[in-house]
Image (tube, rainbow, N blue to C red):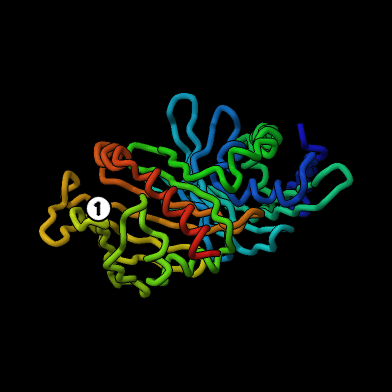
């Protein structure tokens, strides 16, 4: 158990937890920045967490839900207030309703996470600030302290597993639900350059190509919210061609972009088996020690469409493109 002390101060309206880990500060920090790692320990073992959004920057938003042994789900969120990598971050932590909205009937708490180096690794001090003594006692009665003990007891195993989350592992597609898939990959490059590579047509044409033998004759980028983009690819023989189009819904450079996406006809080529199926793609860029973590949450209209698109080899095509991104656009 990494927790060394727990201090409940009813006068200061705080709950402070100190935990020590046999790992460098940066390794522990990255575990909190990467939703794939965070969801392995944020919830207690009997209530594992699934993160559907994780914007680790001031003004960003994190959303997640924990699933109980009976299939019951309980949603939560963070509003990111401040971040000083890899030393500290501060969030406003609250509950979500079944509709995914902030639950104002339950307490919200301000949480600060401070990371420090020690002779044996690193120390994390987590301080929860409550609005009132009633809020503090209410959350403690709901099992907050026990939940934190159980959750932090899982961190050691996560930070010891370097290979599963390192750069060079390749692109990973994780099915989160019937309609959502999270695609993740660490790119060797800083977030500003990775963002530019996703928004500069000349750079896009160099790396967003999928397998060898294809080019990108149409590359119209959406730069402002409300604009549409259009990408088309063609094989070297000119026998096959397809494309995608969509609208830019949100943009927060160099951290987050949200778009719609649907396959379009190109020079007489039909939409194939996907019809008018439209997905929502939420891309988040997060700085980590070995580069930039690219996370794309894809929301499909239904499970059938999800499985059909995954079966096309989408993940392999994305990996070929990301490898080319490292070799060319970021070289």
The residue identified by callout 1 is: 278
Local packing at callout 1 (Cα closer than 10 Å; few below 14, some 14-19, many 20+) is: some
Judge left or right: residue 31 versus residue 244.
right
Q: Is residue 170 above or below residue 321?
A: above
From the image, which quarter does the C terminus lie in? bottom right
Closer to the camera, 171 or 113? 171
Residue appearing at x 72%, y 51% in the figure: 26
Residue appearing at x 19%, y 46% in the figure: 274
Residue 271 x, y percent position in the rendering: 16, 52
Residue extending farthest to the front is: 237
Residue 227 x, y percent position in the rendering: 29, 72
Residue 55 x, y percent position in the rendering: 53, 57
Secondary structure category for the residue under label 1: loop
Judge left or right: residue 43 versus residue 154.
left
Closer to the camera, 157 or 210? 210
Rendering quarter of residue 7: top right
Rendering quarter of residue 84: bottom right
Rendering quarter of residue 237: bottom left
Q: Is residue 281 above or below residue 22?
A: below
Residue extending farthest to the bottom is: 224
From the image, which quarter does the N terminus lie in? top right
Q: In this view, does 114 lie above or below 249?
A: above
Answer yes or no: is residue 149 visible.
Answer: no
Residue extending farthest to the right is: 119
Residue appearing at x 48%, y 57% in the figure: 284
Residue 269 x, y percent position in the rendering: 13, 55
Residue extending farthest to the top is: 70
Closer to the camera, 184 or 225? 184
Answer yes or no: is residue 269 visible.
Answer: yes
Number of numbered discs overlaid on the protein picture: 1
């Amino acid at each position: 158990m990494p927790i060394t002390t727990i201090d409940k101060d009813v006068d200061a309206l705080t709950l402070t937890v100190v935990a020590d880990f046999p790992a460098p500060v940066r390794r522990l920090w990255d575990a909190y920045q990467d939703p794939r790692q965070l969801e392995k320990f944020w919830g207690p073992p009997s209530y594992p967490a699934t993160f559907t959004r994780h914007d680790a920057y001031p003004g960003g938003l994190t959303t997640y839900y924990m699933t109980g042994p009976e299939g019951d789900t309980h949603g939560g969120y963070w509003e990111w207030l401040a971040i000083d990598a890899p030393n500290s971050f501060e969030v406003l932590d609250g509950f979500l309703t079944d509709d995914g909205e902030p639950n104002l009937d339950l307490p919200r708490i301000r949480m600060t996470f401070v990371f420090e180096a020690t002779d044996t690794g690193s120390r994390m001090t987590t301080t929860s600030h409550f609005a009132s003594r009633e809020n503090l006692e209410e959350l403690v009665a709901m099992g907050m302290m026990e939940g934190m003990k159980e959750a932090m007891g899982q961190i050691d195993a996560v930070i010891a597993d370097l290979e599963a989350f390192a750069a060079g592992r390749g692109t990973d597609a994780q099915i989160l639900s019937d309609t959502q898939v999270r695609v993740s990959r660490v790119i060797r490059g800083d977030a500003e350059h990775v963002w530019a590579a996703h928004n500069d047509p000349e750079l896009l044409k160099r790396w967003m190509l999928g397998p060898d033998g294809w080019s990108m004759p149409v590359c119209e980028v959406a730069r402002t919210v409300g604009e549409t983009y259009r990408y088309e690819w063609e094989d070297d023989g000119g026998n096959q061609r397809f494309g995608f189009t969509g609208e830019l819904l949100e943009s927060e450079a160099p951290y987050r972009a949200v778009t719609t996406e649907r396959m379009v006809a190109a020079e007489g080529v039909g939409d194939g088996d996907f019809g008018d199926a439209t997905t929502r793609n939420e891309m988040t860029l997060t700085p980590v020690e070995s580069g930039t973590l690219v996370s794309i949450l894809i929301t499909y209209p239904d499970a059938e469409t999800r499985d059909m698109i995954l079966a096309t080899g989408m993940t392999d095509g994305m990996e070929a493109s990301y490898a080319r991104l490292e070799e060319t656009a970021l070289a």
